[in-house]
Image (cartoon, rainbow, N blue to C red):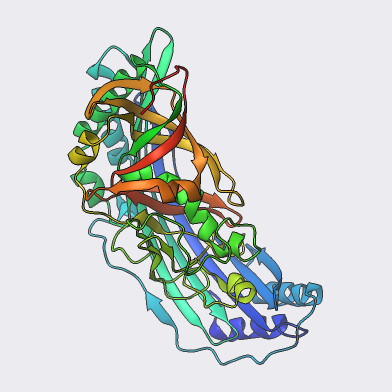
Amino acid sequence: MLTDSNISRILEAAMSKSCDFAEVFYEESTSRGVALLNGKVTSAGTNYDAGVGIRLMAGTNVVYVYSSDKDPEVLINLAKEAADALKGGSKADIMELQAKCFSTPNLINIDPMKVPKSDMVDFIKKASDYASSYNEMITQTTGSIATSNRIIRVYNTRGLNKEESQSRIRLSMEVIATKDGEKQTGRIAPGTMRGYEFINEYPILDKVAECCDSAIRMAGAGYAPSGKMPVILGNGFGGVIFHEACGHALEATSVGIKSSCFTDKIGERIASPIVNAFDNARIEGEWGSYMVDDEGNDSSNLQLIKDGICVNYLVDELGSRRMNMPATGCARRSNYSYAPTSRMSNTFIDKGTDKVDDIIADTEYGLYCTKLGGGSVDTATGEFNFAANEAFIVRNGKVCEPVRGATLIGKGQEVLMDIDRVADDLELSAGACGSISGSVPVTVGQPTIRVSSMLVGGRDSGEEA
């Protein structure tokens, strides 16, 4: 354990040259879990890691170093080497460390770290066996339970001295249905910051049945049409399009270097007037939540878009310096081997007033995407493409036949402008987000929305709306 005296010496070493700000980030993390394939264990284990990251800043010049060696003398020498490498700036004063501030949300009734792995295996095996016997078209099952406990401590030359403990648990179950050589997937992957009671209370067999039904339905579906048409995006993970095509473009990581399509858009309309969007890291128990970010700043419930107007960016310390805006408590990193940067937490389009049935009834012809898969996005242009894992044709206001192979293609800024209906069924879904500071747990979400016109890549010619 590094004492406050040790931390002060490391900070003094970091500030020995032309540094105007220095930070020490200490992290301990323990993770454990199991994974099964077709009901048989493929992995089960526990991992522990700990280390220290030291960041020095001179204006917008940054040097970041890290080590798994927690010997104070090693870290002091590392800080001195970093100080020698930093260019520019002027030496600043070091404020005395404040009394440590602790933040540990108490949402755990059953500690996942103490649950026998055999209980986890039994839970996944029960779900796997149920899926395998559900229908002869189900040819493969995979499942896992992963838990983690992360303790971070952040100190800096402004006197900041904070600690937070974060515990998470996530369940994943995937089934594959095969028909005439065609394979389709059904998947669930909920996550939370609660304890193992989340697993005990989860209606796993009902959810597995839904996965099987979805995979079987898509395996027997015809191909999706192509062309421009209205697209209805289902709630929950449908929000991945907003996360990828719009959320990343609102992060200081790209806005601060003017490589975002939303650079200099504060106060301007970037979406339909019926769109409101938030990044709220303070939703109790939500997968992407935290109280203190990885720079030691308090997290926030940040509105990004208000009635279609861009009102905020996600800003970290470096972004604050580049953009002359205050930090918003959104700095995150996968672990101590990464410098922090602006990242999303629980990011979603807020609920509207429409009913899902009314949106469908109001659509003469279009595509209804109930489940989205992976995709790619260019934050500079906003261009994206996403695969629809489950989709249906809407015809004359009715949900009709399922279709497979649909790809949604567009630009984030255009999609935001073309949203013409927003339902009241907001739902959030757990995920993981990768960026320059590694992979972090995030939540995406939205209610059911309709985009008045979007390019759909498919195999058939389709119909005109």
The location of residue 135, given as percent across then percent down, is 25, 15
Is residue 460 left or right of 251 when viewed as pictured? left
* Percent position of residue 291, x then y: 38, 70
**Callout count:** 0
Which x, y percent locates residue 48? 50, 55
> Residue at (44%, 46%) from the top-left corner?
415
Q: In terms of image quadrants, where is residue 137?
A: top left
Quarter of the image with the C terminus is: top left
Q: Residue furthest top?
A: 180
Q: Position of residue 258 (x, y in %)?
A: 64, 62
Q: Nearer the viewer, residue 22 or 265?
A: 265
Seen as rendered, the residue at the extreme front is 464
Q: Is residue 10 above or below residue 462?
A: below
Report whether 93 appears left or right of 355: right
State which quadrant residue 173 falls in. Answer: top left
> Between 15 and 186, which is closer to the camera in this rendering?
186
Q: Residue at x 43, y 50 (%)?
A: 416
In the rendered image, is residue 396 in sight?
yes
Asked whether the viewer can see residue 146, the reply is no
Q: Residue at x 25, y 45 (%)?
A: 199
